Image (cartoon, rainbow, N blue to C red):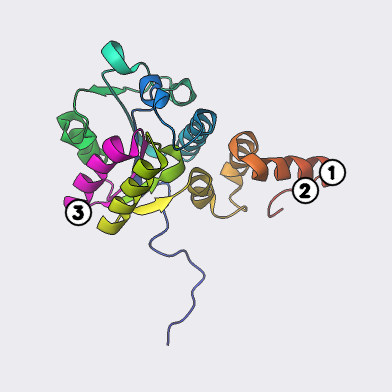
Amino acid sequence: MPQAQAKPGKLLLSPSDHTLIMIDHQSQMAFATKSIDPVMLRNNAALVAKAAKEFSVSTILTTVASKTFSGPIFDEIKSVFPEADIIDRTSMNTWEDQRIADRVNAIGKPRIVFAGLWTSVCIVGPALSALDQGFEVYVIADACGDVTDEAHERAMQRMVQAGARPMTSLQYLLELQRDWARSETYNQTVATSIQHGGGYGLGLIYAKTMFGGSEGH
């Protein structure tokens, strides 16, 4: 008979057990992205970047042909990591760039979390490659997008069938926090949720304004 224990399951992410790779969040890629509204996409990318920064997650930022074709990385990401060394590639599959492999190996985490454009190219390639090499893979589905709903959904299905674990941007933030008694990250988690958490953020504003309420306090 299993015995319940008051501790998190091993499949949950923690700030220290994974590397976040944000791929090709660039204007040229976003122009043709139709599976998600570009305003929501930029909002979700900002949420993910701020979550990673707040919890000191090992983060790799990468673009493709930024100077000749695709444009710079979203400012919502760059402003969170102003000093980041962004790797600019020629390869559509991020995982085939040796600089990415070197950085992943230097960080040394067994789990990789991916987000980027387009799901069917820029995310499927590295996700399947990382799975093939023994990494655990998570994909933040609503910080990704593709040229059609069909393209995004088929890409997500393909990765899930291969063993990737899908999640959302707000889920990523709250999974890293996971306990409102963690006071060192509480204020920033609430601030990020208010700014980028949609209806949930509105609820936090309401509770604080009307009742002085706070999560778990």
Q: Quadrant of residue 202?
A: top right
User: Is residue 180 covered in magenta?
Assistant: no
Question: What segment is highlighted magenta in the picture?
Answer: 108-136
The circle on residue 213 is: 2
Indicate left or right for 131 with 21 as reference.
Answer: left
Structural distance between the alpha carbons of marks 2 and 1: 8 Å
Foreground: 46 or 81? Answer: 46
Say what secondary structure mark 1 lies in. helix
Q: Position of residue 141 (x, y in %)?
A: 42, 45
Q: Are marks 2 and 1 in contact (CB under 8 Å)?
A: yes
Give the structural element (helix, strand or loop) at label 2.
loop
Instruction: Give the percent coordinates (x, y) of residue 13.
Output: 41, 53
- The residue wearing badge 3 is 134
| Residue 64, above or below 206 | above
Q: State which tag comes first along the sequence, 1 or 3.
A: 3
Q: Residue most toward the right?
A: 210
Residue that carries the numbered disc 1 in the rendered image: 210
Which secondary structure lies at badge 3? Answer: loop
Residues packed near mark 1 inside 10 Å, few (<14), some (14 to 19) or many (20 plus): few
Q: Residue placed at 38% from the left, 47% from the top? A: 153
Q: Amino acid at mark 2?
A: Gly
Image coordinates of residue 213 in percent, x first then y, are 77, 48
Of 28 and 42, nearer the camera is 28
Answer above or below: position of 193 versus 38.
below
